[in-house]
Amino acid sequence: MRKQIIFTILLSLFLIQTQAQTKKMPAKKPVVTTKAKVNPKPKHIVTKINPAKSAERLVEIKTDYGVMVAKLYNETPLHRDNFVKLVKQGFYDSLLFHRIIKSFMIQGGDPTSKTADSTAMLGSGDVGYRIPAEFLPSLFHKRGALSAARDNNPERASSGCQFYIVQGKTFTLEELEKIINSRNLSRKQLMMYSLYQKDTVQARLSELQASGNKEAQQNYMLSLQAEVEKEYGKLEPNKIDYDQIDYYMKIGGTPHLDGDYTVFGEVISGLEVLDKIAEVQTRPGDRPVKDVRMKVRMLN
């Protein structure tokens, strides 16, 4: 109980100090603060593909609503190679996009969905292994991002088979500031909790509490906070990328997932198919009323 009280005091102080330091993102680069009109064919989307000239593996995802083509990033080789292996095995053929949330994403790859009846709750099927997370600041949850689903494991390792494709939406600068600040605060809390778990830290806090020296307690807590801030500042994922900010404002995505789920590819053709699938009627639990099946093959 004493340790819990100490940690509560420590965390409260940490939150107060961190929130006091929260600032708006400096305008190092001009950004548009109103929703911009999106080019129906943005520069990052190609409509004609030559697999022979592609440096990245290309995959075709065929549905009753049309065909999407995605490229798999070479920067995430573990996810790329696993996905290619499963596609070549025909693993995804006839599986469902079993979870669809408009303006968010469409998810599929649950092996139990192939023969599931219309009332089955889907999403827990797997292949018996996880893929280690491959987080890179340059790979973010833009519209069309191909990302790995996962459960709540602390390592944030990915499901061996389930994936989702981001539809997302556009955000204002103020909305993005809130998302980034909230994400940063959450991650700092986890770092603070991990630091608190150390035997040396607990021993020192107990010693200071027993001494009754409140000033020394406060100074030690502040030193722990400074340590967390210093270590957090070294992490690349928390750096502000103004090109990504601009992208989320003009084209859209799901920025609150960045750094928590591995992005390993993106749709480069067929985003209109993604939008059609995202519009289907769903029942409670986000499963489509009418099954949306996929057939997946490698193009190179």
Image (cartoon, rainbow, N blue to C red):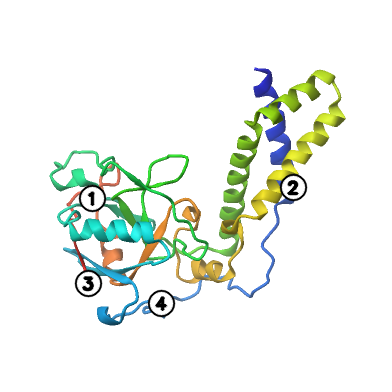
Q: Label 4 vs label 3: CA separation? A: 19 Å
**Disc number for residue 20:** 2
Q: Which residue carries the number 3 mark?
A: 299
Question: In the rendered view of the protein, which quadrant contains the C terminus?
Answer: bottom left
Q: Label 4 vs label 1: CA separation? A: 29 Å
The quarter of the picture where residue 46 lies is bottom left
Secondary structure type for disc 4: loop
Secondary structure type for disc 1: loop
Q: Label 2 vs label 4: CA separation? A: 39 Å
Between label 4 and label 1, give the one nearer the viewer. 4
Q: Nearer the viewer, residue 38 or 97?
A: 97
Q: Is residue 105 left or right of residue 238?
A: left
**Disc number for residue 44:** 4
Q: Which residue carries the number 1 mark?
A: 288
Between label 4 and label 3, give the one nearer the viewer. 3
Q: Label 3 vs label 2: CA separation? A: 52 Å
Does label 4 or label 1 sit earlier along the sequence?
Answer: 4
* Residue 295 image point, x, y percent: 17, 61
